[in-house]
Amino acid sequence: MIRLSKLDGFWMFETDDGYKIKIRKADINDREALIKFYQSLDIETIYNRFLSVVRNFKSIVEKITSDDTGFCVVAEFNGKIIGDGEAVFIEKPVRAEVALVVKREWRRKRIGTALILVLREIALEKGIKWGYATISLSNVASLKIAKKMNAEIKRIDINTVKVCLPLTGEKEGCWKGKII
């Protein structure tokens, strides 16, 4: 597993090839940078993240940076966002939809794993027990992270699975309640 160092309000993580990555909770002051980050992603990455091609990210960014509806963590290198992990409340406070996205050139450096670990830590502090995601079967990296996090996985159709991440380790109750 990776080593994250928790500092005053953020986490540090060093990739295997020596890059020092800062991970922190995003807030409303990060909205413009998050929109630019999403706009910088290639079409395939956008599709894998949203399961459709999204062009207007404003409402998404507002939702993930508002404490009433969710929260977001960002991975930064030299002050630029290179990845994010987000949670949007489904059934506050116990269930949330979760998602990750890392810029293509920063993949395979375990940044997604670091993001999900920080996202999990904050989610547990907020009382979230289960995180849910809908993932395309072609999104191998997200499926690997889900399996690494001991997720429950159910096939929805020929191309898609629904994932339940038992954030407390408690799988009982994963598929109960209001699920996305």
Image: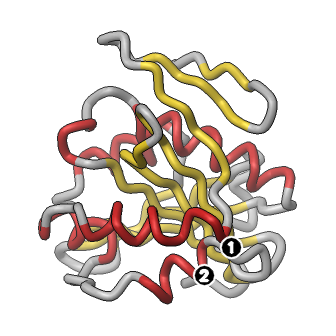
- The Cα–Cα distance between marks 1 and 2, rounded to whole angstroms, is 6 Å
Rendered location of residue 157, percent (x, y) = 25, 80
In the rendered view, tell whether residue 95 sits above or below residue 6.
below
Residue type, numbered disc 2: Lys
In the rendered view, tell whether residue 76 sits above or below residue 19.
below
Q: Which of pointers 1 and 2 lies earlier in the amino acid sequence? A: 2
Q: Do the residues labelled 1 and 2 touch (CB within 8 Å)?
A: yes
- On screen, residue 71 versus residue 180, left or right, reads right
- Name the residue at 71% across, 81% down: 69
- Name the residue at 62% across, 22% down: 4
Which of the two residues, 90 or 27, is positioned nearer the viewer here?
27
Mark 1 — residue?
70
Which of the two residues, 74 or 110, is positioned nearer the viewer here?
74
Mark 2 — residue?
63
Label 1: state its secondary structure.
strand
In the rendered view, tell whether residue 22 sits above or below residue 166.
above
Residue type, numbered disc 1: Gly
Which of the two residues, 155 or 33, is positioned nearer the viewer here?
33
Q: How crowded is mark 2: few (under 14 residues within 10 Å), some or many (20 or more)?
A: some
The residue positioned farthest toward the left in the image shown: 43
Residue 30: image quadrant is bottom right
- Name the residue at 22% across, 61% down: 41
- Name the residue at 18% across, 76% down: 158
Rendered location of residue 140, percent (x, y) = 23, 48
In the rendered view, tell whether residue 9 sits above or below residue 139.
above
- On screen, residue 140 versus residue 66, left or right, reads left
Rendered location of residue 99, percent (x, y) = 47, 62
- On screen, residue 119 versus residue 67, left or right, reads left
Label 2: state its secondary structure.
helix
Quadrant into which the C terminus falls? bottom right
